[in-house]
Image: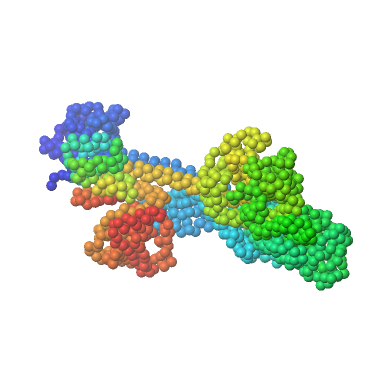
């Protein structure tokens, strides 16, 4: 089985590092792309030539926030088919409904749990709608 | 020892191990001074190239501040006998950042101690150090929240002792942190609220609930009581120490006060509205008074409510009687002990009230010493007395007293009392007006019928008989007679009801009878209520039975021609009102007698020309017809047109005009009703010297006859009536009052013969009587209309909740006007500005909508003077008094103003004005109306102000809440994000991801991890409390697989059982239908029930069952634990009933049952308990199977209602 391509856009350096450690060191994933902002995000991703299986988005992104970025990606022929998952510390039902309405496939609340995250990512890859927060 | 590795294989193995370990290893040959470094350095320092073996390769990368470690460290190590090398320093990475490393090495020495080589490893501690500093930062942030929060926060231990309080809390209670720590919380808690708090706190500490909220009172250090809203949350202990609780307290005193005040005001005003309605609708006022007094008394919680009525209505009443009384339970009615009669007003605080032009409120601070002594004697601690005015007459007083407490009367109470007194007065007035109207109608009808009877014949004998047979309908009596004056003798010409009429019919020298003399001299009626008490009464033996007398002079052209006398056998029978009516009738009778006598005379001169007689009798009969017609009119508006038409029809006049004196005071607004022939004479024209016949008639009050306009020097031609040949102007006079002028014009010269003038003068007198009658009738009608308008308004106005709405309500009842209304309020009433006035609402003429007027105006300054009513008829006149002010009005386009003070108790809060763009005269009706409106407006203005203030308070509280919530939400977000790093990095390090960790380190890392989780749960709580506060707790609806949710909870529960002797049986129906709900919350419910069962069951079995039943899923969690006593079963759910709660679904945080029930119910389901003490419990959850749309709709609805 080929390695899933994973993209994580997150402005908080420590959170990017956590993802890196979780996916590359703790788990056996190898294909992780990290971005810290959404400046020209589509062009940059197109240039990478990658097609992503999972896109994790933070909400507090600049210049486009998570919702705007989700909308941009969802509309894109190359990235629109990815599972777009929100990674956020603002997991209220109101926000969750907004995410669902925007086109997110799921949400995982911050902080991530290193015990549940592996199976969450598997369930996402299996197509399940994961809306969970610690 | 050789400085080379023992063998190449060894070295190779070492290198391989080093690579496998992925650590930065080094081997420094001190003797040869060469270094080998493993590739692990690449990883720590993010390098693409492997490290070199250069000695200074690492040192060059060490942070300059840390290099001294090596400079002094190595020599020290070498010189010592130690062989362990452990230092921490920073090394620069490829990207410029620094890695924190622990350099741990082992020094090998030769036997003589000479250092040979140092073998060691660099452990990257960067993540851990960042994690530790993040924990410190997070804690610092929490401290910041604690110290700077706008809400009071306090940490308490399980015994309720304060561990720490924040500045907001100290400020709120007025104690220092030190003081708070040293006293039990019961010392600053309001005694009544302690029990509820203690119960909830006990449940919290026992873990039955996770947090709770309540509103309770605190006693500040200065003994003031304040209201606080508490959110108490338990912080689960991470070690063996006792759990502590965080209490957040928001000062809601203002809100509570505003709420309570508002509720009270609403209740009081509601009572007032109800009472006013009762007064309005009551057919019999005395029937509703007992109920009204009870309502008033109960609403403001007094001991007594009483109504005193003045014994004699005069200008300075001194005594009154207690007519009605309501007493509270346990209070002895005063009315029984007093017998209610002739109470001195000075003794009950009512004295002097009649002098007040406006209502006077008297509280216990302004009572006379005599009244205070008396009140003290009956145990009254506080009292309020309000005068009742019926119209302008002081009728009595409404009194309230309180024997339970001394109290300051609240403005809204004063308002209610004042309005009740005024409503009562108005009701009295209305009742009187109704009675008066009824009587006036009867009188008018009697007069009309009498007049009809009298004018239908010209035969003297018949006229006399009809006078006596009709006078009884106007004034009842025992006997009546008519006397006519001949010289100095009064002859009884007709009588009725006297037994010995023969002897009675004789001539009297009326000088012997003072009553007749008086009538002759004054031309006014005389009443002798009791003849026995009147010293002047001339007692005739044959009329000794006569005990009460009323007489009226028969007046013709102001000359007394005789008397109409009434006698009664009942002492005190006749009164002033009878006299007034008798006179009205006598005036008609006099004209009839005069006409009959004239007719008689004419008939007696039969030898004169037949033709002339016919002419005059024609005039006389026509006059009789006209007077008959006009006496049937009761309505002023109909009277004059009817009169003009009748005169034109019956006589062959060229023109008939009626001029009315425009004396506004007391005059009615007169609408011409289409007739051009009715005009007004204004007072100024009466002063003109060169004048028409009309003006001269008005000036001289004598008929002005011009029989040939061509020969007259004084005739003033009227171009509209060029054919005028003769003119007769007749003054219309009643008593001393000039009503107007009747102007007759003819096309024939000499039309107005002396006989004709005489007949016409008689007619003018009858017209005057008719005008006065209709005026009287209209006045009572107006009085009634006025009281009705005020009544209708009071209910509409009371419902108004803004200043413009008050005017709008007033307008809607009055109807369109030809003037505007303005409501102005003094600034010191509205806000804390000492001077000035703000016009808060203006309604334009004819406009039913009032609008806000925020402009500050100077004009009501004149209202500051102590006159209740200010009238400016024309600003042009007013300018002579105050030019500046006058110009100001003119600039506003105001020419005339009628302004009444709006009073609240004894305080003037503003004014209500009628204003007009034209100079204008305000009628009495309008003057009374504005007074009434101002009284009505006062209550509504006060109510509106309170409403607006409360609204502002609520808005402020909501704004504060929103800001606080936003702050806390941001804070929580800010705290959660670093926790992602803290928890995960710590876990990675603890799991050995970054290399081996020893036991000591593992324990420290586990501590850090558990502290981090603790912090997370604390943050979750803060976030949740925020949601609860703003009522934003809702559900995220998605499809939920109940089997999975149950399996997850059971799996967690199994982990919790650990070593307990507990079995866990499941009987879960496979493939339960999915339901739509919040997956996280449903899991939370199950997990809570199962983990509670594990927690509270020492041994035995836990049984989890799930079934699909009809349209719901039924889950039962049964245990064999200690069970819950019946009296506690409600309690474990109850404490949370009004709190929408959200708690982290983390295992082991002791989620409360109330929360689970909240979520079960939020899903449209139920959660209940069956338990027996000592035998275990069964918790049932029933979750309905609903469509996604239904679940979403229900959630939206419940959000909206919260």
Q: Quadrant of residue B891?
A: top right
Task: Give B356 or B332, whichever is nearer the viewer.
Answer: B356
Q: Is residue B965 left or right of residue B1037?
A: right
Residue drawn 13% across and 47% down?
A: A1
Task: Give B221 or B40, whichever is nearer the viewer.
Answer: B221
Q: Is residue B1108 left or right of residue B360?
A: left
Task: Give B41 or B1202, whichever is nearer the viewer.
Answer: B1202
Instruction: Where is residue B577? Give x, y as percent.
Output: 74, 60
Q: Is residue B300 left or right of residue B481?
A: left
Instruction: Where is residue B593? Give x, y as percent.
Output: 76, 60
Task: Give B216 or B486, whichever is nearer the viewer.
Answer: B486
Residue drawn 14% across and 39% down?
A: B16
Relative to B373, does residue B61 appear above or below in the rendering? above
Count of residue discs: 0
Q: Is residue B674 visible?
A: yes
Q: Quadrant of residue B1202?
A: bottom left
Which color scheme is applied? rainbow
- Quadrant where the N terminus of chain B is found in the figure: top left
């Amino acid at each position: 089985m080929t390695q899933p391509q994973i993209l994580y856009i997150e402005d908080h350096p420590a959170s990017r590092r956590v993802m890196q450690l979780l996916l590359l060191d703790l788990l056996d994933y190898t294909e992780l792309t990290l971005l810290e902002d959404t400046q020209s995000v589509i062009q940059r991703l197109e240039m990478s030539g990658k097609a992503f299986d999972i896109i994790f988005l933070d909400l507090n992104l600049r210049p486009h926030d998570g919702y705007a970025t989700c909308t941009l990606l969802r509309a894109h022929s190359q990235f629109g088919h990815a599972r777009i998952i929100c990674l956020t510390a603002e997991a209220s039902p109101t926000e969750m409904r907004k995410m669902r309405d925007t086109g997110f496939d799921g949400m995982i609340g911050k902080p991530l749990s290193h015990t549940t995250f592996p199976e969450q990512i598997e369930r996402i890859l299996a197509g399940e709608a994961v809306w969970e927060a610690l | 020892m050789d400085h080379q590795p023992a063998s190449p294989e060894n070295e190779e193995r070492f290198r391989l191990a080093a690579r496998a370990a992925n650590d930065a290893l080094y081997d420094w040959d001190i003797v040869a001074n060469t270094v080998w470094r493993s590739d692990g350095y690449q990883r720590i320092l993010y390098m693409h190239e492997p490290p070199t073996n250069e000695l200074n390769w690492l040192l060059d990368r060490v942070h300059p501040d840390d290099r001294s470690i090596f400079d002094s460290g190595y020599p020290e190590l070498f010189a010592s006998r130690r062989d362990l090398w452990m230092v921490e320093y920073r090394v620069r990475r490829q990207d410029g950042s620094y890695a924190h490393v622990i350099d741990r090495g082992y020094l090998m020495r030769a036997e003589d101690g000479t250092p040979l080589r140092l073998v060691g490893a660099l452990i990257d501690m960067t993540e851990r150090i960042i994690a530790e500093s993040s924990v410190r930062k997070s804690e610092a942030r929490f401290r910041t929240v604690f110290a700077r929060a706008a809400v009071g926060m306090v940490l308490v231990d399980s015994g309720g002792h304060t561990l720490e309080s924040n500045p907001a809390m100290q400020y709120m209670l007025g104690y220092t942190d030190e003081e708070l720590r040293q006293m039990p919380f019961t010392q600053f808690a309001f005694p009544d609220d302690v029990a509820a708090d203690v119960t909830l706190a006990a449940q919290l500490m026992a873990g039955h609930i996770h947090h709770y909220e309540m509103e309770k009172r605190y006693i500040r250090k200065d003994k003031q009581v304040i209201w606080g809203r508490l959110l108490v949350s338990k912080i689960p202990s991470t070690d063996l120490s006792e759990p502590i609780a965080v209490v957040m307290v928001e000062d809601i005193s203002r809100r509570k006060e505003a709420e309570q005040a508002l509720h009270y005001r609403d209740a009081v005003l509601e009572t007032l509205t109800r009472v006013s309605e009762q007064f309005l609708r009551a057919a019999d006022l005395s029937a509703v008074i007992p109920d009204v007094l009870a309502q008033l008394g109960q609403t403001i919680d007094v001991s007594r409510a009483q109504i005193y009525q003045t014994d004699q209505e005069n200008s300075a009443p001194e005594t009154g009687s207690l007519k009605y009384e309501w007493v509270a339970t346990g209070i002895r009615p005063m009315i029984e002990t007093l017998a209610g009669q002739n109470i001195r007003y000075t003794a009950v605080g009512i004295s002097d009230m009649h002098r007040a032009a406006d209502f006077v409120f008297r509280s216990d601070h302004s009572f006379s010493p005599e009244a205070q002594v008396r009140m003290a004697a009956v145990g009254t601690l506080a009292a309020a007395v309000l005068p009742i005015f019926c119209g302008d007459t002081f009728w009595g007083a409404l009194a309230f007293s309180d024997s339970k407490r001394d109290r300051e009367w609240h403005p809204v109470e004063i308002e209610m009392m004042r309005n009740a007194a005024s409503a009562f007065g108005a009701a009295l007035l209305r009742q009187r007006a109704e009675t008066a109207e009824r009587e006036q109608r009867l009188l008018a009808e009697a007069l009309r019928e009498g007049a009809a009877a009298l004018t239908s014949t010209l035969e003297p004998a018949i006229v006399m008989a009809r006078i006596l047979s009709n006078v009884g309908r106007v004034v009842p009596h025992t006997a009546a007679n008519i006397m006519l004056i001949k010289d100095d003798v009064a002859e009884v010409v007709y009588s009725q009801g006297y037994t010995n009429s023969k002897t009675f019919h004789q001539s009297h020298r009326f000088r012997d009878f003072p009553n007749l003399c008086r009538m002759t001299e004054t031309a006014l009626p005389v009443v002798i209520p009791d003849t026995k008490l009147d010293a002047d009464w001339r007692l005739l033996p044959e009329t000794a039975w006569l005990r009460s007398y009323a007489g009226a002079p028969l007046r013709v052209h102001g000359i007394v021609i005789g008397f109409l006398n009434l006698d009664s056998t009942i002492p005190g029978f006749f009164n002033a009102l009878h006299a007034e009516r008798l006179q009205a009738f006598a005036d008609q009778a006099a004209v009839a007698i005069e006409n009959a006598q004239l007719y008689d005379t004419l008939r007696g001169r039969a030898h004169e020309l037949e033709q002339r007689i016919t002419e005059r009798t024609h005039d006389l009969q026509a006059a009789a017809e006209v007077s008959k017609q006009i006496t049937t009119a009761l309505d002023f508006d109909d009277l004059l047109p009817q009169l003009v038409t009748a005169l034109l029809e019956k006589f062959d006049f060229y023109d008939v005009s009626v001029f009315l004196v425009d004396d506004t005071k007391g005059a009615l607004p007169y609408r011409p009703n289409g007739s051009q022939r009715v005009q007004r004479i204004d007072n100024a024209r009466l002063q003109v010297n060169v004048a028409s016949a009309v003006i001269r008639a008005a000036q001289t009050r004598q008929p002005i006859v011009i029989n040939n306009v061509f020969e007259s020097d004084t005739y003033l031609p009227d171009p509209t009536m060029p054919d005028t040949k003769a003119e007769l102007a007749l003054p219309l006079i009643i008593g001393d009052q000039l009503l107007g002028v009747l102007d007759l014009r003819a096309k024939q010269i000499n039309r107005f013969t002396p006989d004709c003038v005489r007949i016409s003068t008689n007619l003018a007198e009858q017209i005057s009587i008719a005008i006065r009658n209709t005026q009287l009738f209209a006045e009572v009608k107006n009085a009634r209309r006025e009281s009705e308008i005020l009544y209708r308004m009071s209910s509409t106005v009371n419902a108004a909740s803004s200043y413009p709405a008050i005017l709008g309500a007033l307008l809607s009842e009055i109807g369109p006007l030809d003037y505007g209304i303005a409501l102005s309020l003094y600034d010191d009433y509205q806000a804390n500005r000492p001077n000035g006035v703000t016009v808060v609402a203006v309604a334009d003429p004819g406009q039913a909508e009032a609008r806000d007027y925020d402009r500050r105006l100077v004009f009501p300054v004149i209202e500051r003077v102590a006159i209740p009513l200010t009238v400016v008829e024309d600003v042009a006149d007013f300018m002579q008094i105050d030019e500046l002010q006058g110009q100001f009005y003119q600039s506003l386009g105001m020419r005339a103003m009628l302004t009444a003070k709006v009073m609240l108790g004894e305080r003037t809060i503003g004014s209500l004005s009628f204003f007009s763009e034209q100079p204008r005269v305000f009628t009495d009706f309008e003057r009374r109306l504005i007074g009434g409106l101002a009284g009505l407006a006062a209550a509504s203005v006060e109510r509106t102000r309170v409403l607006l203030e409360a609204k502002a308070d609520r808005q402020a509280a909501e704004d504060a809440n929103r800001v606080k919530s936003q702050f806390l939400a941001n804070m929580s977000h800010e705290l959660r994000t670093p926790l992602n790093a803290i928890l995960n990095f710590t876990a990675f390090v603890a799991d050995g991801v970054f290399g081996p960790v020893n036991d000591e380190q593992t324990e420290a890392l586990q501590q850090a991890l558990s502290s981090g989780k603790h912090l997370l749960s604390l943050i979750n709580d803060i976030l949740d409390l925020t949601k609860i506060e703003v009522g934003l707790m809702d559900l995220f609806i998605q499809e939920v697989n109940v089997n999975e949710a149950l399996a997850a909870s059971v799996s967690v529960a199994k982990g919790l059982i650990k070593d307990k002797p507990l079995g866990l049986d499941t009987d879960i129906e496979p493939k339960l239908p999915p339901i739509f709900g919040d997956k996280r919350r449903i899991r939370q419910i199950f997990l809570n029930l199962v983990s509670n069962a594990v927690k509270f069951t020492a041994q035995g079995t836990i049984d989890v069952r799930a079934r699909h039943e009809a349209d719901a899923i039924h889950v039962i969690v049964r245990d064999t634990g200690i069970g819950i006593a019946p009296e506690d079963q409600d309690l474990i759910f109850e404490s949370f009933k009004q709190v929408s709660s959200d708690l982290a679904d983390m295992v082991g945080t002791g989620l409360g049952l109330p929360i689970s029930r909240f979520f079960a119910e939020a899903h449209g389901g139920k959660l209940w308990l069956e338990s027996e003490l000592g035998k275990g419990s069964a918790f049932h959850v029933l979750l309905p199977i609903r469509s996604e749309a239904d679940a979403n709709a229900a959630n939206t609805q419940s959000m909206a209602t919260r």
